[in-house]
Image (tube, grey):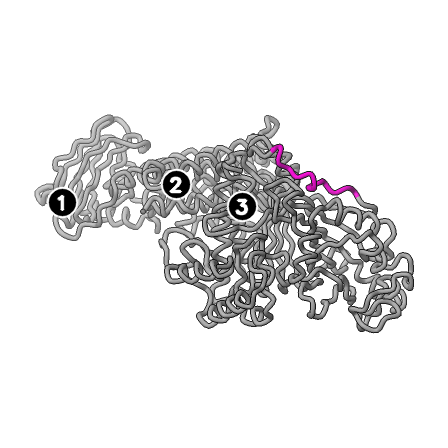
Amino acid sequence: MTDTQEATAADADDRKAAPSRRSLIGWGGAGLALGAAAAGGAVAMTRVGNDVDPAAAETGAAVAFHGANQAGIATPVQDRLHFAAFDVQTDDRAEFVRMLKDWTEAARRMTAGKAVGEGAYGGLAEAPPDDTGEALGLKPSRLTLTIGFGPSLFEKFGDAFGIKDKRPEALVDLPQFAGDNLDKTRTGGDLCIQACADDPQVAVHAIRNLARIGMGTVNIRWSQLGFGKTSSTTPDAQTPRNLMGFKDGTRNIAGTETDRLKKFVWVGEKDGPDWMTGGSYLVARRIRMHIETWDRTSLQEQEDVFGRDKGEGAPVGKAKEHDEPFLKAMKPTAHVRLAHPDSNGGITILRRGYSFTDGTDGLGRLDAGLFFLAYQRDVRKGFIPLQRRLSAQDALNEYIQHVGSAVFAVPPGVRGKDDWWGSTLFSKEA
Amino acid sequence: MRAARLSVVTAVATVAALTAVTGCTQKSKAEGDGAIKVTAADSTCDTSAKSIPAGQVTLSIHNTGSQATEVEILFPDDRIVSEKENIGPGTKYTLTAEVKAGDYEIACRPGMKGHGVRQKLTVTGSGAAAQRDPRLDKAVASYREYAQEQADATIPKVEVFAKAIKAGDLKAAQNAYAPSRVGWERTEPIAESFGDIDPKTDTRADGLEKGQKWTGWHALEKALWQDKKIGADQKALADQLVTDLKDWQERIGKAEITPTSMANGAKELLDEVATGKVTGEEDRYSHTDLSDFKANVEGAQQAYELLKPVAQKNDKALTAELDKRFAALDTTLDKYRSTKTSDGFVSYDTVTEAQRKELSDAVNALAEPLSKLAAAVVK
């Protein structure tokens, strides 16, 4: 029996006892889609194959929460994001672990389309409801919730939580890159939750409810909404465009590419530390785009900057988006040329970024850009060398600025109903 | 007999006073009808009956003491059924009220302050109100006493504030502003429950409704800090503030307070902090927000401590968490103490964004579990 089927069966049992925001029809669709994927012989243990069926997205189905890896990494990219970084407020290990367990239970319910705790209504009239209620009646919308632990967690709470010697070597503090103009209030965090869903209200509901459960134990340091996916982990799908109007990251790792995921994304058994096996490392960067100056840039320069044509997204001199690029045909500072694995000794990361627009700034300029999210097996062999090169040479730098930054160790998946987020790091046996 | 002062808020007392006219002229009849004789002295309060049938009750009061006294019939949670204030030494008064079956107390308050001397009064018959956990009645009674103390202590401070304004002394008025608000801020949910006092005394410029005249503390705050001038208008406002707050002081005894409203009131005080003080909106001209902040937290803690014995029995984890979070918030607030200001805290415009976030986090950390107190009390 696969993890998928376990999750499905458990959810079905649970449903009888607790209020659900999911319609019966939606649930039936989800169950069928998941069942079909499992029966089709997909790589069930890694959950990679679970979500390939495009029907799942159409039905607003649930993505299984349990698995060897956390969902929300190789999962086909959902349309919307709410990403939150938290700071820990307690040095009481038991209190922190209790919160992780409470979070896990809430995440298990919300990803299945259910309300948190006792629900949003019908409880004691004198008490505020457990669930905030705005996702009632909405489908699970492929909600995934992914947790990560930042370097500062180990630095600030290493002694208190008994994890001082457990900080992975790969979880380095990101160096200062050329052109970085980082806003302290949008940078760092002791832990993070990435909420992705096809419905923005479902993603926001998830972060809001987790923040509420954690309040006092952890508090939100910063958070970011994303509205348009800029990458795809589904091979045949159209590569989405970023706010500059270009397709970028067309050769992303697909959720079905088990070998490449293993090679570039998942932390392997021998990579160490043990608690990270099956996990990954996440880099988050808030990249502001100078939208107005970009918009008055000539088409030729825009295409030169990226190294692609704007219409099709084909590399310079090629006809189709997915045609193998001929890097030497591009300008030496072209973005595609500099970022391509062939220019970087094969470096490959899994991109999962979203466009954002947080209104306008005081000068009337769009406060917009790319909230870049990348997963990799080792930051030192992924984002850092890549960004060193891009920050020094990329022609795009004239039109962008990195204003927020964070890095997190993303632990492996929650294995079953008794398991919890971070158990490999925090359980007594760990 | 003293002329009864008529006011809307003391409607019950007014009825009593009118009855008293009859009572005075037909004294023998009232006593003959089975009135309870109340002999109020300086340290005793003797009543001629401990048990009466439900219906109309008449108290035939005689102040044998050396100072003015106040006599009240009280519900188990100390809410006033009926009262007569300011009964002079040697004078008599007749007080009547409708009472349903249940347990009451008769209180004599020599000097018209404090807990007073109490006597039990059992009213027999049908139609008794549902019995409440006596520990909760005690909590409500103690909280009402606390609120009354706060109001009693506030009046002289407001009078100092008003006096400074009327003397045109800007500096003295600025110094008296924040201290005059402390008792109010500690018990604000009670004042708000009256509906009509808060708009007169504590409205901010942005809270004014169309056509509403801006009165109260914040109108004066703007004059003292932003306009830096005191005119005839401000002097009139100062007088009115004292009058309105005396009204508040008098009505606390009749406020509807329940264990649930106490618990939710504590949460609301934290909400006040989270939406008004942390942002610096409350005292935007004087920047004395931290003084109000502290008073709100103290008031919330008082309500919590009184409910804690019951809450602890029902939800031990919750009270343990609340104890921890109240202490943490106090520690955070203590960082902003100052000996240089009249209210004991630094001016809020010197508190940085990062520090405001820290304060906000500590408030949220407390307010979230505090929102579960009501349920833990009634469980």
Q: Is residue A409 left or right of residue A125?
A: right
Q: Residue at x 69, y 60 (%)?
A: A354
Magenta stretch holds residue A38: no
Q: Residue at x 51, y 60 (%)?
A: A4
Q: Is residue B222 left or right of residue B129?
A: right
**What secondary structure is marked by label 2?**
helix
State the image coordinates of residue B326 (x, y, percent, origin top left): 47, 35
Distance from label 3 to label 1 (Cα)? Answer: 58 Å
Q: How many marks?
A: 3
- For the record, the magenta segment spans A164-176
Mark 3 and mark 1 residues within 8 Å of each other at the beta carbon: no
Q: Which residue is mark 3?
A: B274
Distance from label 3 to label 2 (Cα)? Answer: 26 Å
- Any mark on residue B26, and which? 1
Which corner quadrant of the image does residue B370 belong to? top left
Tag 3 subunit: B
Tags 3 and 2 both on a single chain: yes
Secondary structure character of the magenta stretch overall: loop
